[in-house]
Image (cartoon, rainbow, N blue to C red):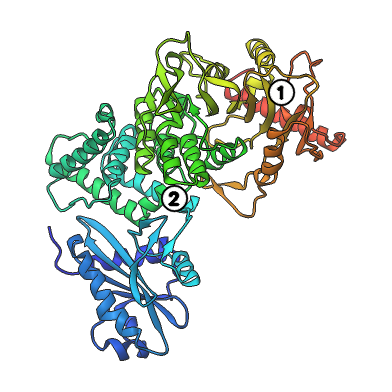
């Protein structure tokens, strides 16, 4: 059904501007309200746009709508020539920002925006991608302040992202997309959108599905990844009702992604696809069933920076999940490269990732393709059956996967990883993944791993592993993470930094850090960035980087926060956690009593839950 008027856009525009883009109700003027502004009517006469947003006392933002997506260029032209150019003749007000928006309920909405800059209208971009939704208050303010239509280094806020992810998850539920299938559905949509060409949404449902699947297949074929087509694919349901619901789900998802400015968001510092997957896992089988816990983006960034990942490194994540660490490594190196040629070499040969879960490795692949970081070295498989061997291509040192562990030259210089938590059936311990990774590394290479606390304090096989680790390698630092870092998964974790192949010198210091504040706060079932919360990771970044380069550097102790000192090898349990080493005040009777009360309450709750008498 094709709509002949713009009336269907009115509600969409008002809702987006007021609820999602940060504009106040009094700032967004409808056609009736516009006609009451004398200075605007003076120049526009009787022809009025859909909306005009009052940015401040002098500046206005013009929005013109059309009834179908194919009329986007017409909406943009009219916003420019019929409204903004005329308003800019005024000496009292300006209209240097405009948006053309086109669409309807059946095919969704798409937008394009321009800014009058240096005497001409220019398309507004964010992170080198055209903005496809209405402009937010903060975007408009940044454009005017900088007098530049090209916004750089913009990150979508955590709260805005989760709002969009929850919205999409809700509409997928409403349109009968099964909870365990949503991540796959999303990966197909995103892959189809990755080449930025327009998808015709005003077609029959199954024609639309064929179009999206064909696009995804062609992109996978382009990157020699056709084997993943069966995991990045929208299935055709039976029955016309199911067909209509599927089309609605596709159209509304694409509309939400355009409102989110998905191309900009995917180029930002967020692991966007990983976050979508995190939201969908909450309603599907759940991360605990498959052992996957997604590493928060600020931790992956922290890791690549403290390890100084650079263009000369060969980086491995043997349990890469949705690719969070790999994306962080790509982004870090891209900042450091002096030329496109240098980054192209790293893109092709600097990154290696392995993931066993079909759906998850597909998401990692889409994550990388969307950013145009794709290479042939992110693969599906069991890491314990894949080995890396040093080789060369055009005189450059690179790595290749081989099936046999024997007779290899070890290639990897940096490892970034968050091993899956043990699965009930296999019970593969996290430290086994660390041992595997070390067997791929050159001597003096650096490894960063997230580990559950038991790996660092428990006796038995954990203790034996810690002893083996120290006989052959050096522990540089252990960092206690916030208790709720992986909320809602209740696992207490730490980060460990290891230097490969250098037996631990008992006299050498280790940098022990208790970084329990990371600038995030739990809100509505999520941990979101909050500027009011202290950020220990910003404080320890430079001292830790210095220490990794030189373990003899003097780092002043900070009580209950960090300290450099040797490992206590007289400790029979060989606990490798900061709390064992940090300086602290002697406990008061009040603290002791409080601790005892907490322990008794926890014990009572446990006994009630498990019906222990």
Q: Is residue 441 left or right of residue 222?
A: right
Q: Secondary structure at mark 2?
A: helix
Q: Nearer the viewer, residue 502 or 449?
A: 502
Q: Is residue 495 above or below residue 153?
A: above
Q: In the rendering, at what x and y percent does residue 124 appear?
A: 37, 64
Q: Quadrant of residue 611?
A: top right
Q: Residue at (41%, 50%) from the top-left corner?
A: 265
Q: In the rendering, at what x and y percent does residue 351 appear?
A: 45, 31
Q: Nearer the viewer, residue 342 or 135?
A: 342
Q: Secondary structure at mark 1?
A: loop
Q: Quadrant of residue 15?
A: bottom left
Q: Nearer the viewer, residue 75 or 329?
A: 329
Q: Earlier in the sequence, mark 2 or mark 1?
A: 2
Q: Is residue 439 left or right of residue 362?
A: right
- Could you tell me if residue 241 is visible in this image? no
Disc 2 marks which residue? 161
Q: Residue at (24%, 56%) from the top-left corner?
A: 108
**Residue most extreme to the top:** 406
The span from disc 2 to disc 1 (Cα, nearest Å) is 37 Å
Q: Residues within 10 Å of mark 2 (few under 14, many from 20)?
A: some
Q: Is residue 599 left or right of residue 289?
A: right
Between circles 2 and 1, the one closer to the viewer is 1
Q: In the rendering, at what x and y percent does residue 404 appear?
A: 43, 10
Q: In which quadrant of the rendered image does the N terminus lie?
A: bottom left
- Could you tell me if residue 96 is visible in this image? yes
Q: Residues within 10 Å of mark 1 (few under 14, many from 20)?
A: many
Disc 1 marks which residue? 576
Q: Is residue 77 left or right of residue 296?
A: left
Q: Residue at (59%, 37%) from the top-left corner?
A: 308
Q: In which quadrant of the rendered image does the C terminus lie?
A: top right
Q: In the rendering, at what x and y percent does residue 296 appear?
A: 53, 39
Q: Quadrant of residue 346?
A: top left
């Amino acid at each position: 059904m094709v709509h002949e008027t713009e009336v269907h856009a009115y509600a969409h525009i008002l809702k987006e501007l007021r609820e999602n883009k940060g504009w106040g109700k009094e700032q967004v003027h409808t056609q009736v309200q516009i006609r009451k502004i004398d200075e605007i009517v003076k120049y526009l006469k009787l022809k009025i746009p859909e909306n005009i947003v009052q940015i401040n006392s002098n500046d206005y933002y013009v929005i013109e709508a059309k009834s179908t997506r194919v009329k986007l260029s017409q909406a943009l032209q009219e916003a420019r020539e019929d409204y903004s150019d005329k308003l800019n003749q005024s000496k009292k007000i300006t209209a240097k920002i405009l948006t053309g928006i086109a669409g309807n309920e059946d095919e969704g909405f798409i937008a394009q925006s321009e800014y009058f800059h240096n005497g001409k209208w220019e398309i507004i971009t964010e992170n080198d991608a055209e903005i496809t939704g209405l402009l937010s208050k903060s975007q408009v303010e940044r454009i005017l302040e900088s007098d530049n239509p090209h916004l750089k280094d913009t990150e979508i806020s955590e709260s805005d992202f989760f709002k969009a992810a929850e919205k999409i998850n809700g509409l997928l539920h409403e349109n009968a997309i099964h909870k365990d299938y949503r991540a796959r559905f999303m990966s197909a949509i995103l892959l189809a959108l990755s080449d930025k060409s327009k998808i015709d949404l005003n077609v029959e449902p199954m024609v639309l599905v064929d179009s999206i699947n064909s696009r995804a297949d062609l992109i996978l074929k382009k990157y020699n990844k056709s084997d993943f087509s069966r995991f990045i694919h929208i299935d055709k349901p039976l029955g016309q009702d199911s067909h209509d619901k599927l089309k609605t789900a596709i159209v509304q998802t694409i509309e939400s992604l355009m409102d989110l400015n998905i191309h900009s968001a995917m180029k930002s510092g967020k692991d966007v696809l990983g976050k979508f997957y995190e939201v969908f896992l909450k309603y599907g089988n759940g991360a605990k069933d498959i052992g996957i816990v997604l590493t928060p983006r600020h931790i992956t960034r922290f890791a690549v920076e403290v390890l100084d990942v650079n263009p000369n490194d060969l980086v491995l994540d043997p349990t890469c999940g949705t690719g969070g660490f790999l994306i962080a490594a790509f982004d870090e190196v891209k900042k450091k490269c002096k030329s496109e040629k240098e980054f192209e070499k790293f893109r092709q040969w600097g990154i290696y990732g392995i993931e066993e879960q079909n759906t998850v490795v597909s998401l990692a692949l889409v994550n990388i393709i969307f950013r145009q970081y794709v290479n042939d070295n992110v693969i599906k498989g069991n890491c314990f059956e894949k080995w890396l061997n040093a080789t060369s291509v055009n005189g450059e040192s690179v790595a290749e996967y081989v099936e046999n562990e024997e007779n290899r030259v070890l290639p990897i210089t940096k490892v970034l990883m968050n091993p899956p938590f043990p699965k009930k059936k296999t019970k593969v311990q996290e430290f086994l993944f660390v041992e595997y990774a070390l067997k791929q590394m050159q001597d003096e290479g650096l490894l960063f791993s997230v580990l559950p606390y038991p790996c660092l304090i428990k006796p038995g096989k954990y203790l034996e592993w810690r002893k083996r680790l120290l006989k052959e390698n050096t522990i540089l630092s252990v960092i206690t993470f916030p208790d709720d870092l992986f909320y809602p998964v209740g696992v207490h974790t730490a980060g460990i930094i290891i230097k490969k192949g250098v037996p631990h010198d008992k006299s050498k210091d280790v940098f022990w850090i208790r970084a329990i504040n990371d600038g995030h706060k739990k809100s509505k079932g999520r941990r979101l960035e909050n500027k009011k919360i202290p950020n220990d990771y910003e404080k320890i970044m430079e001292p830790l980087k210095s220490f990794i380069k030189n373990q003899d550097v003097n780092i002043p102790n900070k009580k209950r926060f960090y300290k450099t000192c040797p490992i206590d090898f007289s400790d029979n349990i060989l606990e490798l956690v900061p709390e064992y080493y940090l300086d602290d005040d002697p406990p008061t009777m009040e603290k002791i009593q409080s601790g005892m009360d907490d322990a008794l309450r926890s014990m009572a709750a446990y006994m009630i839950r498990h019906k222990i008498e």
